[in-house]
Image: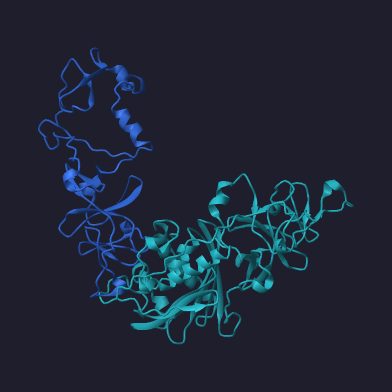
Amino acid sequence: MIINNWYVAAYADDVADTPVPVRMLGTDLVLFRNGAGEVACLSNVCCHRGGSLAQGAMCEGCLTCPYHGWHYDASGRVIKIPALGENIRIPKRARVDSYPVREQNGHIWVFLGDLPEAERPALPDLLPEYGDRETWRTMHFVKDWPINWMRLSENFADTFHIPFVHAFGKHLSDGISFGRVEKTSRAPKRYRASVRARKKHKPTPR
Amino acid sequence: MYINFWYPAEWSKDLTDEPVKVRMLGQDFVLFRDSSGIVHCLSNTCIHRGGSLAGGKIVKDCVQCPYHGWQFDGDGACRAMPSLGPDARIPARARVDAYPTEERYGIVFAFLGDLPEAERPPIMDIPEYGQPGWHVQRSGSYSDGDFRRQLDNALDPAHNEFVHPTHGFSGTNDDYQTPELTVEDTEWGCGFLTKYFAPPLKDKKMRAASGRTENAVIEAGTFHHGPCDMCTRIHPTGETFMHQNVFKVPVDESHVRSFLVQTRNFLLGAEHDQRFLERNLEVGGQDRVILADLNPKFTPETNAHEFLLPADEAIVRYRQRLAEWQARGWRIDVDRVEQQRSRKAFAIPSPARREHPAGWVIDTVPMMESGQATDTKVHAVR
């Protein structure tokens, strides 16, 4: 598994007024919206005694630990420790990791890594047609795959398996061929496998 | 998990005329009563070919292996090997580990370790047990998790406000502050009694039972004894006392069996027991939700990877004690046991091994070396 990459963490609509736990790269994280409605992503482990922050409640834009009520802001800093009362200086070490977040196309993306902003890869713009409701219909679905991520990614990049693995491939009309691999200018460092069809497919009208 | 302490093995009433198998500290034991009513606790593994003794019968004050009928007496010595005939001389090596037992508070305790009698830590005392004016209520439970996380939680005065809304509050008071803590050391543990701000209880019946209808400052606190036992003392008023004496035994690293002996000097009739039981279940359930999701699952090996506060002082001292017991060679090396699981049987060393170190068939569990020094610092934030 690779750090320093943008990962999609949730649908934006699903992060509202309660914290949402997500597990990515084998670690537990929590998403929540601060008082301004901006999404934050923190490590889910309270630095005090390991409480699961996602079980906690929101309080004045902060996420509070369910175990002893420590308040975390969107930057991952502890800004209140109820057991110590008011007017105490909270040490800088009282913090958890916080990760950059962007909302795009109805998804929440989290940058899991430590690269400074200038060096981060751009947020992938995989859906330039998103929002074009005139000519495109959008369907969402989310699925947990109990398999290794690399095997899955490679499978999606693999056109040749379609007629063997997927029954629908056997029923495509003549003239559709699999397996022509082109190098494209859009993604010069990658190979895009294209399915070439004689007829141009029109999108299904909404 | 630590040897050389008394552990609760079974409720006395549940040990009658059949052998009973119990798992403690990751190993299996067999408990049985002889004809005079004395309870015995042996390692459950037959030295012949590994039969589970608890699957057999009690014969002539011995437990008889279900596989080939070998009989072991309460001291663990083999008394009969049927395939050799009745007159066979049984070698001294033909024995299993036997552990000292004691019945107290309605519980069969077994001393799991090899210390001679004079050096053994005592069973946790309940001074009011059996005294007039006190009622005793027992209940048991199994739970997932690390016993250290459970003891940490019991020694933690700062979580009630957030985890236990049944206590009348739930982290909503802006002026909330954890009470000052004076941690007191005992011979085999530590703990504290302190003053808590306490609104009247939300549950009507409990509110009436507690005798408190107004905001008050009540006395409460917890002491631990050894690695696994604890007593939470709750004094709803100056005259009403309830003590939750809990004897715990790690079934293995991830499971705990708890024997609760509650003593109270109010609502003495057994007709009130159900109400207390339900409340214990509710409060215990609130803790379990939190403990189930702690990360890591087990208490960290060093305090350096937590951010501990003055309110965690008793927890820090508890962990210091654990480190001391580890330094004495009392901590089981769970990883090495696990590596050989299903391939090799182990036994917890019993006192007889001190007298006769050689000639045992089953090896003892590997023990951990003295651990790294525990970071005992708490953040002095005040």
Q: Is residue B187 above or below residue A124?
A: below
Q: Position of residue B361 (x, y in %)?
A: 72, 51
Instruction: Confirm whether residue B213 shows in the render.
Output: no
The quadrant holding residue B259 is bottom right
Q: Is residue A56 left or right of residue B156?
A: left
For the residue pair B42 and A5, the one nearer the viewer reads as A5
Q: Is residue A11 left or right of residue B145?
A: left
Q: Which corner quadrant holds the N terminus of chain B? A: bottom right
Instruction: Confirm whether residue B305 shows in the render.
Output: yes
The quadrant holding residue B25 is bottom right
Identify the residue at image location x=31%, y=56%: A54
Q: Position of residue B123 (x, y in %)?
A: 60, 73
* Chain that is coloured cyan in the picture: B
For the residue pair B232 and B169, the one nearer the viewer reads as B232
Identify the residue at image location x=43%, y=66%: B282
For the residue pair B55 and B181, the one nearer the viewer reads as B181
Q: Position of residue A72 (x, y in %)?
A: 25, 62
The quadrant holding residue B236 is bottom left
Q: How is the image coloured?
A: by chain
Q: Which corner quadrant holds the C terminus of chain B? A: bottom left
Q: Position of residue B279 (x, y in %)?
A: 45, 70
- Residue farthest to the top, as pictured: A174
Q: Is residue A189 left or right of residue B168?
A: left
* Chain that is coloured blue in the picture: A
Q: Is residue B115 above or below residue B252?
A: below
For the residue pair A19 and B320, the one nearer the viewer reads as B320
- Residue farthest to the right, as pictured: B87
- Residue farthest to the bottom, as pictured: B238
